[in-house]
Image (tube, grey):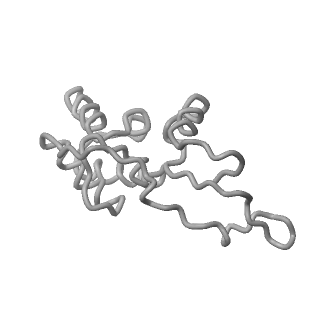
Amino acid sequence: YYTGVPAATDELRAHLLEQLPEFMVPQVFVHLDAFPLSPNGKLDRKALPAPDMAALRSREYEAPQGDTEIALARLWAELLNVERVGRHDNFFELGGHSLLAVSLIGRLRQDGIDANVKALFEQPTLWEYAEITERMEMVL
């Protein structure tokens, strides 16, 4: 949520990416003329409008390739409660956050895959994370 001059979402996102790591940049932006306030002058969170999920950044769908991408896509879809995950989808843009990232790592380790959360934050797209996960497995 932001107020002030309406900005193009891509411009706002680009500006924030100059200041913040990608995983900290909001996936949906909602412009408000003013923040709703409670009678005591604090932000009234309950009065904020729900974000339009159609505003989520979307990419052309490309099916996962290879066993690792397919397995990760299935797990991401389950954890993030989305219908499908393409190879260029970003874990955090699909609704992932740090707690889900930790859950993902735990599930991967249960399946015998040595994964770490730092790699997910650095390589958040499915194909990138699959690639780094495969490389970590080769080192072992």
Q: Classify residue 135 by image quadrant.
A: top left
Residue with the most extreme left position: 66
Please report the residue visible at 59 percent of the width from the left and 36 percent of the height from the top: 16
Q: Position of residue 65 (x, y in %)?
A: 14, 40
| Quadrant the C terminus occupies | top left
Residue with the most extreme right position: 40
Q: Nearer the viewer, residue 18 or 109?
A: 18
Residue with the most extreme top position: 139
Q: Is residue 2 left or right of residue 91?
A: right
Q: Classify residue 95 by image quadrant.
A: bottom left
Q: Nearer the viewer, residue 57 or 4?
A: 4
- In the displayed structure, 37 sits above or below 73; it is below
Q: Is residue 74 left or right of residue 39?
A: left
Q: Position of residue 6 (x, y in %)?
A: 63, 47
Q: Position of residue 60 (x, y in %)?
A: 27, 44
| Quadrant the N terminus occupies | bottom right
- In the displayed structure, 77 sits above or below 113; it is below
Count of numbered marks: 0
Q: Is residue 51 left or right of residue 121?
A: right
Q: Nearer the viewer, residue 62 or 104?
A: 62
Please report the residue visible at 26 percent of the width from the left and 55 percent of the height from the top: 75
Q: Nearer the viewer, residue 63 or 130?
A: 63
Please report the residue visible at 22 percent of the width from the left and 33 percent of the height from the top: 134
Q: Is residue 104 left or right of residue 22?
A: left
Q: Classify residue 54 by image quadrant.
A: bottom left
Please report the residue visible at 73 percent of the width from the left and 68 percent of the height from the top: 44
Q: Position of residue 133 (x, y in %)?
A: 27, 35
